[in-house]
Amino acid sequence: MYTLAVQDHFMIAHSFRGEVFGPAQKLHGATYEVELAFRRAALDPDALVVDIGLATQVLRALLDGLDYRNLDEVPEFAGQNTTTEFLAREIYQRTVTAIGAGSLGPHAGGLDSVRVMLRESPRAWAAFEGPVG
C-alpha cells in the first residue's frame, strides 16, 4: 500500500458538555497539527498516490472553514462535543467529499483510503481512517 501525507495546523476554541471533561467544560482553545494521509494499492497513471500540491491546497481549504473559530458557535456542530476524535472524522468526511468533487485531480477516485490524524500535543493524538467512495 502506498501512502502520501500532507500536514498543516488550525486553531479553534470550544467547550465540552459532561462531567467526564472536567475543566474542559469551560471555553478553551486548541491548536491541532493535522496529518492527512492518502493510501492506494497501485500508483495512478502519473506514478502518484495523489498530487501533493493539490493535497496541500485541499487540506488548507478544509481547515480554513474551522481555523480561528469558536466551534460552539458553528450551527452544524450544535449539540455536539467537538472532541479531537469527532474533528478527525469531520475532516475525513470533508476530504472524501473533496475527492468526489474532483478537487484532488482526475485519478484521486482510485484512492483506497484516507486517514486523518490530529495531534493535540506532542504526546496526544486521535485519528480517523476510512474508505474513499
Image: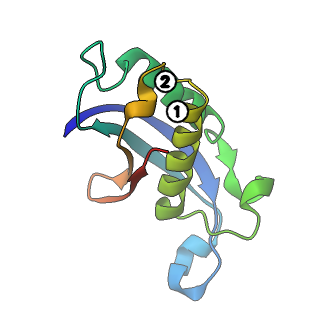
**Amino acid on which the number 1 mark rests in the picture:** Ile
In the rendered image, residue 52, in percent from the top left (x then y), is placed at 36, 19
Query: Which quarter of the rendered picture does the N terminus lie within?
Result: top left
The residue lying at 59 percent from left, 39 percent from top is 97
**Going from the N terminus, do you reach mark 2 or mark 1 first?**
1
Q: How many dots with numbers?
A: 2
Label 2: few (<14), some or many (≥20) within 10 Å?
many
In the rendered image, residue 101, in percent from the top left (x then y), is placed at 61, 29
In the rendered image, residue 99, in percent from the top left (x then y), is placed at 52, 32
User: In this view of the protein, which residue sits in the foreground, 132 or 32?
Assistant: 132
User: In this view of the protein, which residue sits in the foreground, 14 or 98?
Assistant: 98
Residue at far left of view:
1
Residue with the mark numbered 2: 104
The residue lying at 43 percent from left, 23 percent from top is 56
User: In this view of the protein, which residue sits in the foreground, 11 or 79?
Assistant: 79
Residue with the mark numbered 1: 99
Name above or below for residue 75 compared with residue 50: below
The residue lying at 61 percent from left, 83 percent from top is 18
Query: How is the structure coloured here?
Result: rainbow
Q: Which circle marks residue 77 in the picture?
A: none
Name above or below for residue 121 compared with residue 97: below
Asked if residue 121 lies left or right of residue 65, the reply is left
Residue at far top of view:
46
**Amino acid on which the number 2 mark rests in the picture:** Leu
The residue lying at 23 percent from left, 37 percent from top is 41
Q: Tag 2's secondary structure?
A: loop
Asked if residue 77 lies left or right of residue 114, the reply is right
Where is residue 120, by image quadrant? bottom left
Where is residue 6, by image quadrant? top left
Instruction: Determine contact: label 2, label 1, CB under 8 Å.
Output: yes
